[in-house]
Image: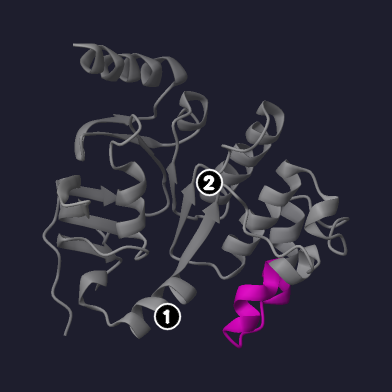
Amino acid sequence: MLSAHPPLGRPGPHPAAVARDLTKVYDIEGRRVTALDRVSLDIRRGHFTAIMGPSGSGKSTLMHCLAGLDSPSSGTAWIGEVNLTELSDRKLTLMRRDRIGFIFQAFHLLPALTVMENITLPMALAGKRPDPQWLTEVITALGLRDRLTHRPPQLSGGQQQRVACARALLNQPEIIFADEPTGNLDSRAAAEVLRLLQHAVHQLDQTIVMVTHDPVAASCTDHAVFLADGTVVDELQQPTRDRVLDRMRLFDATDSD
């Protein structure tokens, strides 16, 4: 029987993801480095959330712990009502395969496979067949219908990231984690990918958590969470580019003291 995680703020439907007192300590050449320090956070279902902070703030570590890609030193991470820290390695692998989607900065497409084969590969490996109607909807929404027989080397960076988005959406996961998804793209391609992620959230009811350092990317989200020195130091609802920049200037001012 699963234990219920304690609510943060007002009670309501279970969030898509939850961190409770999440701590991650690394031993680097005999020196203890605290990447996360008792972080507690709710990720609202059906929302687009940005995780921001200066280099070394712990934002990628937080995402990896929330996504089950890394184990915390203490505390708990949840996807829905499932406590990831209680799962065996096998069950954690199944959780990542069946209920979590990933979009990485480096795309992680297989160059020998076509666009269609890359999109459907995770489901094929799981022994599943995609729903034809949903597959068509995803491909159409992401503008890939005329690229399905191409291979990744034949695509632009923006097109490759669209393929990565389609792959993440196809399995209809509970939550998608995106690690700097626009980091390798020019401004035009980055804007295109951000529009697609917004579409996934607001039209397809997807939940997305995006690690980013870009104020423009953050301004496309519903909620921005700011980390510094492994702790949550601020949050913004409906962030704008200017409000995010103002918050980031505070980080710079603190670092220079």
Give the vertical position of 231 relative to 122 (above or below): above
Q: Residue pushed farthest front?
A: 29
Q: Does residue 200 appear to the left or right of 179 in the view shown?
A: right
Residue for badge 2: 202
Residue at screen point 21% across, 16% down: 254
Question: Viewed as shown, does residue 113 lie left or right of 202?
Answer: right
What residue range appears in magenta?
119-134
- Marker disc for residue 158: none
The amino acid at mark 2 is His
Q: Nearer the viewer, residue 214 or 141?
A: 214
Snapshot quadrant of residue 79: bottom left
Side of 195 where 85 appears, left or right: left
Q: Position of residue 92 (x, y in %)?
A: 35, 77
Classed neighbour count for the residue bearing mark 2: other residues with Cα under 10 Å, few (<14), some (14–19), many (≥20):
some
Residue 187 counted in the magenta span: no
Q: Amino acid at mark 1?
A: Leu
* Quadrant of the snapshot with the C terminus: top left
- Give the quarter of the image for residue 54: top left
Q: Nearer the viewer, residue 40 or 220?
A: 40
Secondary structure under tag 1 reads: helix
In the displayed structure image, the side of residue 198 where residue 149 appears, left or right: right
Q: Foreground residue, 71 or 82? A: 71
Furthest-bottom residue in this view: 127
Q: Position of residue 205 (x, y in %)?
A: 50, 55
Q: Image point 56% across, 47% down: which residue? A: 105
Residue at numbered disc 1: 94
Residue 12 in sight here: no
Q: Earlier in the sequence, mark 1 or mark 2?
A: 1
Main SS type for the magenta part? helix
Element marked by disc 2:
helix
Image location of residue 231, percent across then percent down: 18, 39
